[in-house]
Amino acid sequence: MSLRFHEISEAGHRLLNPLSDGKLDLIGEICRIEEGSRQLDLACGKGEMLARWAARYGLHGVGVDLSEVFLDAARRRASELGVSSRLEFVAGDAGAYQAEPASFDLVSCIGATWIGGGLEGTLALMRLALRPGGLVLVGECYWATPPPPEAAESLGFEPGTFTSLSGTEDRFEASGFELIEMVLSNEDDWDRYYAPQWRTLSDWLLANPDDADTPAIRDFLHRSRRSHLEYGRQHLGWGVFILRSRT
């Protein structure tokens, strides 16, 4: 899916993952964030996590994302919460962002491990910016129940991209990290992420019948709706995993 499709379908979203407001707040509590802590958020989307935690805990942070549309929303949200001076938002490829080594207490990538070619590669990128004793927060899918062979293709994944929940922990361990906490999404979280996109896309199609992307967006809407109802809701899990380096 193109970046523009993301920007259109998630126009009404503040959180660009299947994560409720309450669970985002819970993750902040789990991380025990202190005044002046520094966070790097790779593929930060609209910057809701950074802005909210800066307001609540006095955190300072950097968010990196490809989408200028999302970054404009992030800057507006930071201004709304009165934390613009604590946050920097950078346009660019999060997988290529050059952070000062060992300079952040928290390094996060929530639902975008494609930036490093998969979970293991993204964890390797995140480790470089992490201070000793810091925490990594990674949002990742896993198979909650064994899927039929056609599920991955329907959902737009390459076979083997995701594994079971215990298999995901194995990948953390192999990358040199210990899983110390997690917050998992449920079916309602998934529905609240996907179903509003269908309304947004349907409204956009009604308002833009002559746009060059209209046929592709109509097809995307159909596939998104069908794949979630047929496979995603039953088989696909998602969570934010809190990790600590073993080395």
Image (tube, rainbow, N blue to C red):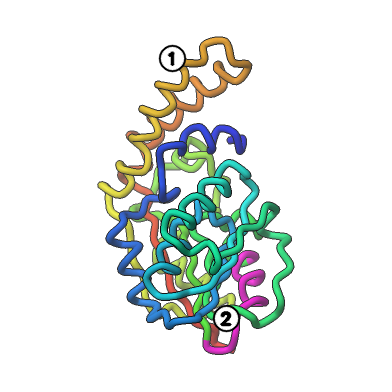
Q: CA distance from mark 2 to mark 1?
A: 49 Å
- Magenta stretch: dominant SS? helix
Q: Which residue is mark 1?
A: 206
The residue closer to the viewer here, 146 or 59, is 59
**How dense is the environment of label 2, judged by Cα within 10 Å: few (below 14), some, or many (20 and up)?**
some
Amino acid beneath label 1: Leu
Number of other residues with Cα within 10 Å of mark 1, as a class: few under 14, some 14 to 19, many 20 or more = few
Q: Which kind of residue does numbered mark 2 sit on? A: Gly
Magenta residue span? 121-133
Tell me where residue 105 appears, x and y as whole percent.
54, 80
Q: Quadrant of the C terminus?
A: bottom right
Q: Secondary structure at mark 2?
A: loop
Q: Is residue 159 above or below residue 7?
A: below
Label 2 belongs to which residue?
176
Residue 231 appears left or right of 105 = left
Q: How many marks?
A: 2
